[in-house]
Amino acid sequence: MFSWIARVIKGIVIALGFILPGISGGVLAAILGIYERMIGFLAHPFKDFKENVLYFIPVAIGMLLGIGLFSYPIEYLLENYQVYVLWSFAGAIIGTVPSLLKESTRESDRDKVDLVWFWTTFILSGLGLYALNFVVGSLSASFASFILAGVLLALGVLVPGLSPSNLLLILGLYAPMLTGFKTFDLFGTFLPIGMGAGATLIIFSKLMDHALNNYHSRVYHFIIGIVLSSTLLILIPNAGSAESIQYTGLSIVSYVLIAFFFALGIWLGIWMSQLEDKYK
């Protein structure tokens, strides 16, 4: 029973990757120890079908609960306490990096090619995501645009480190998506997002499964590069995005609170990593 409840909780946590800017559902799945099993199931759905379905049912329930429970409070917190929320989540991500580094060398030692993968990914993804705010316009909320949102959300699961919420903010779809989640808009929001996500998971899961099985170390150094660059970007003001973090009007007390929430986030990230080692 505890294992079942633990998987529901994992699903709730993974759902945060769908609705929090800078957070990747794939990273959270990797942190919680279910990423590779999830990719394997999606790539080979008929292998150990019953066992995997029973395993992921509580995860799916948790994800739906997480989306429903957290959409409104997260929207409220980001509107009113943006700096503290983003720094706390950045800390949580930083706290989990040691576990990702450990996982990256589980099957082979780190070599020079791994370091090239990391630095290339870190630099190019950082520059690309930062510039994206200036070159991509906003999209109006529609059935078609929410299919695109589903594609991005699925890629955030398949590619740990990719934050779909960041991209949705840039495209102007983040706020409409949260509104749809809050109101449980089944046909206008959940259906098109589910269609886009489902198609993407089916098409790309085999590719990711192959990459993990054959280039495990390379994939994880790629992941770590994106994790660190995307985390850095959510803490840097960007004139190209109205939704980016703002530090204007902060007092000394505010910066002390930022440091506190950042440290609290790091502790939470380390704790989550320890849970992964214990319960995955």
Image (spheres, grey):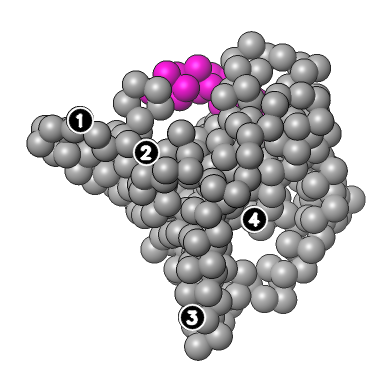
Q: Main secondary structure of the magenta part?
A: helix
Q: Is residue 193 left or right of residue 163?
A: right
Q: Are marks 4 and 1 in contact (CB under 8 Å)?
A: no
Q: Residues within 10 Å of mark 2 (few under 14, many from 20)?
A: many
Separation of marks 2 and 3 at Cα, in angstroms? 30 Å
Query: Of the residues under marks 3 and 4, which one precedes in the sequence?
Result: 3
Please, is residue 61 above or below residue 34 in the view? above
Q: Which mark is residue 249?
A: 1
Q: Is residue 255 left or right of residue 63?
A: left
Residue type indicated by callout 1:
Gly
Residue extending farthest to the right is: 46
Q: Which residue is mark 3?
A: 115
Q: Which residue is mark 4?
A: 159
Residue extending farthest to the left is: 252
Residue extending farthest to the top is: 183
Q: Position of residue 188 (x, y in %)?
A: 77, 18
Q: Which is more foreground, mark 4 or mark 1?
A: 1
Q: Of 86 and 170, which appears nearest the observer?
A: 170
Considering the numbered disc 1 on the image, is that residue within a helix, a strand or a loop? loop
Which portion, as a residue range, is magenta?
60-77
Query: Of the residues under marks 1 and 3, which one precedes in the sequence?
Result: 3
Q: Residue at x 22, y 39 (%)?
A: 258
Q: Residue at x 78, y 51 (%)?
A: 41
Separation of marks 1 and 2 at Cα, in angstroms? 12 Å
Query: Of the residues under marks 4 and 1, which one precedes in the sequence?
Result: 4
Residue type indicated by callout 2:
Ile
